[in-house]
Image (cartoon, grey):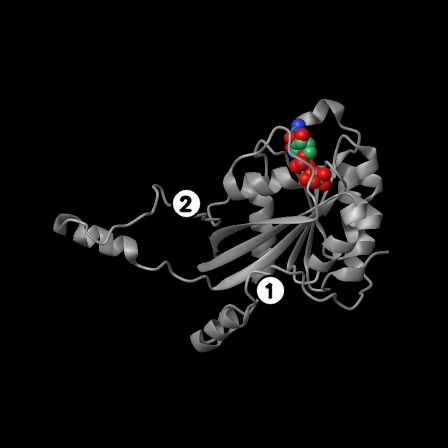
Amino acid sequence: MDPRYDIPHRAAGSGRGSENSSPALGAQSRRRKMPPRPADFKLQIIIIGSRGVGKTSLMERFTDDTFCEACKSTVGVDFKIKTVELRGKKIRLQIWDTAGQERFNSITSAYYRGAKGIVLVYDITKLESFDDLPKWMKMIDKYASEEAELLLVGNKLDCEGDRIISRQQGERFASRISGMRFCEAAKDNFNVDEIFLKLVDDIISKMPLEVPSKELSNSVLSLQPEPEVPPELPPPRLRCC
Ligand SMILES: Nc1nc2c(ncn2[C@@H]2O[C@H](COP(=O)(O)OP(=O)(O)OP(=O)(O)O)[C@@H](O)[C@H]2O)c(=O)[nH]1
């Protein structure tokens, strides 16, 4: 893995402190009570793609380093949080996992607008999921911000024997979309951290990181709290051919 991508491990233990700690543990418990350094940025990333391509598995692998053998199909949207450090900045990622079933499009479309990064996933063993890509691009064009970074992921690389979509086909599709990156991955942790971190790196490399600290803290404060409700719909944009 690229050493620039430094992911802090989750703190071990229950994290439950006690007001009556022994003096010998005083310094240690005081250290434990230090509030964590606030994030410099908060970013939203949305994962989209047809049903069963592995969106939930990718999210869980990246955020919790696990995957479920038989995930339930996502209903509407779900999200997880992960904090990473890149380019000396602490970045709190909110990763939205959307349902692949078309009947949820009216719900999931509301989450596109706030996303700074969009991961569009297909299954390399399912032609239909690849054929659906233009449909997903239409959703992106209609609902996402024009500035959002796009990443196309051909998933289930561990099923090479059942592959139907070649790597070249994936690359060709991505090359036709302005600024879209492409890679292949698998839930057993092939390329998963790398794809998310590369996407975040692409996003923050375009952000003004060297602004004066006062402005930076203002920009953090101005970021919205975790969106419990979908943001307003964006104006349509034209990107897809
Ligand atoms: N072999 C293999 N199976 C995978 C991979 N990723 C996901 N799966 C399996 O594919 C099935 C669907 O995975 P999900 O992660 O639920 O797919 P999803 O895209 O979130 O599905 P929806 O929520 O219905 O849109 C599950 O049985 C997963 O275990 C992978 O990389 N390799």
Nearer to me, 186 or 11 = 11
Q: Could you tell me if residue 109 is visible in this image?
A: yes
Q: Which residue is drawn at 57% across and 40% down?
A: 60
Nearer to me, 21 or 84 = 21
* The quarter of the picture showing ligand 1: top right
Q: In which quarter of the image is the C terminus?
A: bottom right
> 25 above or below 127?
below
Q: Which of marks 2 and 1 is in front?
A: 2
Image position, residue 50 (x, y; %): 77, 41
Question: Dot 2, how many residues are within 10 Å of its Cα: few (below 14), some (14-19), or many (20+)?
Answer: few
Q: What element carries label 1?
A: loop
Image position, residue 32 (x, y; %): 28, 53
Disc 2 and disc 1: Cα gap in Å?
A: 28 Å
Q: Which residue is drawn at 78% across and 55% down?
A: 106
What residue would you read off at disc 1?
Answer: 206
Kind of residue at badge 2 = Arg
What residue would you read off at disc 2?
Answer: 10
Image position, residue 127 (x, y; %): 82, 34
183 lies left or right of 60: right
Kind of residue at badge 1 = Lys
Image position, residue 62 (x, y; %): 55, 42
> 234 above or below 97?
below
In terms of sequence position, does the residue under pointer 2 or pointer 1 come before the other?
A: 2
